[in-house]
Amino acid sequence: MSPTPHSPRGAEEHGRTTAGADGAAAPAGAPSRPAVRRRTVLATLAAAGLGGVGVAAAPRAASAFSGLSGKAADDPDFGPNVSLFGPDTSAKDIQEKVDAVFKDQEEAQFGKARHAFLFKPGSYEVDVNVGFFTQVAGLGLTPDDVKVSGAVHAEADWFDGNATQNFWRSAEGIAVTPKGGTDRWAVSQAAPYRRMHVKGDLELDDGGWSSGGLMADTVVDGQVRSGSQQQWLSRNTEWESWEGSNWNMVFVGAKNAPSGDGFPSPPYTTVEASPTVREKPYLYVDGDGAFQVFVPALLKDATGASWSGGAPKGESLPIGDFHIAQPGDSAGKLNAALKDGKHLLLTPGVYELDEPLAVTAKNTVVLGLGLATLMPTSGKAVMTVADVDGVKLAGFLVEAGAKNSPTLIEIGPKGADGDHSANPTSLHDVFVRIGGAGAAKSETSLVINSSHVIADHLWLWRADHGDGVGWDTNPADTGLVVNGSDVTAYGLFAEHYKKYQVIWKGERGRTYFFQNEMPYDPPDQDAWMNGDTRGYAAYKVDGSVTDHQAFGLGSYCFFDVNKSVVADRSFEVPQADGVKLHHMTSVSLGGTGTIEHVVNDTGGPANGDSNVATVTSYP
């Protein structure tokens, strides 16, 4: 039985309530909301000692820290938007700081402020409620080096429990012992939960609808309860048990994952191992108290968390090898640092760029803190990457500008043909937004021309609500075009583009979890035609491709401007022995519009009579 359809994210712009699209007050299977919210400041907090820190990441002595920032004399300057805490920082001061930032960021969906809370190895008592554009991260080599007693959580109080707009935030690298035994991460897109250790249970909703997310490289000692989550990717995770499902729940390399044999009832897709994966790079403090960036190793056929058996595999880069960027830095200054062989650490803020950042050296790391945001000002791309080995891009948002950018990010030039199988380029938590904060334009958000690229969590979003939103106000054709061969995507979210959301032209591509909403706003059918075809498929594999597989695919429609609009299909693929799709779902949210077929001319419809349509395998 399918759940009650969710309230679309743009509901408030169209005068609807935050209940389900058919008027239901709460989704089926969602837990009740607690009477007392955990956002309440903990009344009595005391800083704890260092104990229990892993050998590989033993901290400097507590006396080295001073003040709210926990900053020692030799700490790098991460700028005013990073709060750096040490175990001797006053618990009262930490709580007051995180509460003050949350008060500003709880509803700041399209604001310009960016924040990062960084906790040095040690033990803390704190309740961290994570709002928009806020990163909470531990600075240990493994999560157990940073222990929090209390909570690191995401709630949806601001939207009456509806978490479908809880975007743009992250938690990583912390062991949490939740007060009361259960923590909550009620989020939707662009809100990764990485390298966490929950010493208890974890809930993924807040009593209202929630709409998708990523959990990766994480251990939950107890149970994960997904509640109203419509779709979710769990990659390289471990837990005691999992409870809950709605439309598209995908498990890759997850220990104790539920079986996917019964799809679509329940709608689980289970892949035993991640065939080729690299975890996201991260900042940490080593045993001598020095800051470094850890770059995890490339793994094959990986299961479970990379750190649960001991220190993770990889290499450490000293912070001196990085240009620590501040939001006032020009593109010229950042490019000069790249040309000098520096990596980039982007501190929180908005970077206005009049030319692309040109990454040309192999193994370059570009790592954002606090969802650092790159914005083009001259109609050019924000970043181009040469066809070289081992570039890592992680933890930043790209915001399209008012001038049209034909492409926002390009990985490898057109015609790139290098073999990077031994050391692929990888993208981690790289997000794109077109509109929402104001009128913006871009034809294609991300183009991957290089081969062997790993895309580890993308959200490519033409805004459906906010400012500067409309059929002709924030035009954007396509989210992702893949021309390279042997490209692997884990957690591919692409939404509301006016044509194809994803076009895949490279051979031997693999996608593990795809989530999509078609554009809400076609004014009529004539405005949304692909030749003689009604609308555009969400996910198109080019007719020339002979080898492609995808696992756990969801595509939804909500044609609220004109309910009579029809999409002929969600997924479009060629007839070839090597092209196979596994576990596909099409949904008409509240029956608002029609998807005629799930894949090619098979399956469906999803419409007002039957909201959900599935196909288990194709062909």
Image: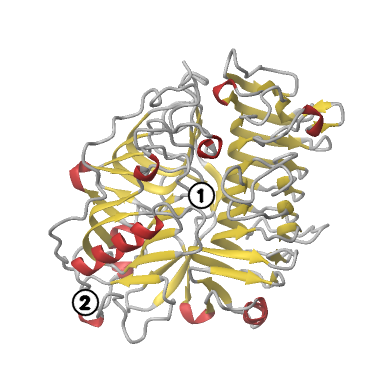
Q: Rate crowding at label 2 as few (under 14), some (14 to 19) or many (20 or more) other CA atoms within 10 Å.
A: some
The residue indicated by pointer 2 is 62
Q: Element under label 1?
A: loop
Q: Is residue 284 above or below residue 253?
A: below
Give the quadrant of residue 298. Answer: bottom right
Going by the numbered disc 1, the residue's amino acid type is: Ala
Q: Which element type, helix, strand or loop, lies under badge 2?
A: helix
Q: Quadrant where the C terminus lies?
A: top right
Residue at left offset 59%, top offset 31%: 554
Mark closer to the chain start, 1 or 2: 2
Q: Is residue 299 left or right of residue 93?
A: right
Measured as percent of width and height from the top left, residue 241 is found at 33, 33
Residue 139 visible, this angle: no
Mark 1 = which residue? 190
Answer yes or no: do the residues labelled 1 and 2 have beta carbons within 8 Å? no
Q: Image quarter for residue 284?
A: bottom left
Residue in the image at 19% along x and 71% along y = 90
